[in-house]
Amino acid sequence: MIRNNLEVDVKVKCVEAGLTQGGLAGRLGITSQYVNHIIKKNDGLINKTFISMLEELGYDLELRYVPRDEFTNR
């Protein structure tokens, strides 16, 4: 099981960055509809087989978000 709610996480990170999902899409050069589709798609952002393998090994998946140094991401 993935413990994160990725849809909420993306929305929170957009708010923290002062961006809308549309603004994020513009920076990525994609449509806001595509950003929304990726976030909400039924099979999720993380490969189900990968999650199944970790579950079979006795693990749940939890993502941790680490801010990048301002100078390394530009």
Image (cartoon, helix red, strand yellow):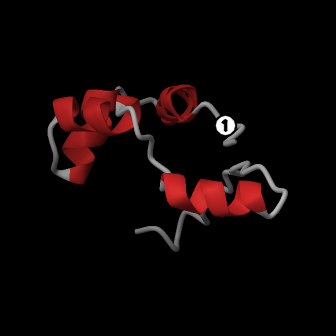
Left or right, 14 with reference to 52: left
Q: From this viewpoint, which residue is outermost toward the right?
A: 58
Pick out the residue farthest to the front: 56
Image position of 16 with respect to 25: above or below = above
Say which amino acid is labelled 1. Asn
Using the image, determine if residue 55 lies above or below residue 11.
below
Residue located 66% across and 51% down the image: 65
Q: Is residue 34 above or below residue 70?
A: above
Front-most of residues 34 and 61: 61
Q: Is residue 3 left or right of residue 35?
A: right
Q: Quadrant of residue 35?
A: top left
Task: Look at 51% across and 52% down and name the residue there.
Answer: 48
Where the N terminus falls, by quadrant?
Answer: top right
What x and y, as percent, mark residue 52?
A: 63, 55
The quadrant in which residue 8 appears is top right
Residue 2, percent across and down?
Answer: 67, 42
- Rendered residue at 49%/29% (across/down): 7
In the image, 39 versus 21, the foreground residue is: 39
* Label 1 CA crowd tier, 10 Å (few <14, some 14–19, many 20+): few
How far from the left and from the top, in percent, is residue 66?
68, 56
What secondary structure is marked by label 1? loop
- Closer-to-camera residue (30/70): 30
- Seen at 27% across and 33% down, the residue is 37
- Drawn side of residue 55 relative to residue 24, left or right: right
The residue where tag 1 is placed is 4
Number of numbered labels in the structure image: 1
Q: Quadrant of the C terminus?
A: bottom left
